[in-house]
Amino acid sequence: MKVVLRNPRRELQLEGPRTVGRLLEELELGREAHLVIRNGTLVPGDARLEHDDVVEVRPVVSGG
């Protein structure tokens, strides 16, 4: 699967299916601090990502 990371921008190519939670764990990124988007749709931590998916991982930004 193609994983696009933001801040700083970089792309990774990973093999095999995995859950969103497992992906973030492998990337050493906290689930609470990152959003995972597949095909323009936010996906939950237990969603299964397939080998042909393109996903984007964005840090959560809050403001006031």
Image (cartoon, rainbow, N blue to C red):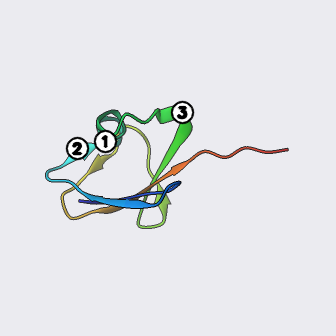
Mark 2–mark 1 CB contact (< 8 Å)? yes
Residue annotated with mark 2: 18
**With 29 as the anchor, is 48 left or right in this view?**
left
Q: Position of residue 21 (x, y in %)?
A: 35, 36
**Amino acid type of the residue tagged 1 in the rendering:** Leu
Quadrant of the image containing the N terminus: bottom left
Q: Secondary structure at mark 3?
A: helix
Quadrant of the image containing the C terminus: top right
**N-term mark: 2 or 3:** 2
Res 23 quadrant in image: top left
**N-term mark: 2 or 1:** 2
Q: Residue at x 44, y 43 (%)?
A: 44
- Graded by Cα atoms within 10 Å as few (under 14), some (14 to 19) or many (20 or more), the crowding at tag 2 reads some
- Graded by Cα atoms within 10 Å as few (under 14), some (14 to 19) or many (20 or more), the crowding at tag 3 reads few
Q: Position of residue 38 (x, y in %)?
A: 40, 60
Distance from the alpha carbon under mark 2 to that under mark 3: 18 Å
Residue annotated with mark 3: 32
Mark 2–mark 3 CB contact (< 8 Å)? no
Q: Residue at x 50, y 55 (%)?
A: 8
**Amino acid type of the residue tagged 3 in the rendering:** Glu
- Image height of 48 relative to 30, above or below: below
User: Which mark's residue is nearer the viewer, 2 or 1?
Assistant: 1
For residue 23, the mark is: 1
**Amino acid type of the residue tagged 2 in the rendering:** Arg
- Graded by Cα atoms within 10 Å as few (under 14), some (14 to 19) or many (20 or more), the crowding at tag 1 reads many
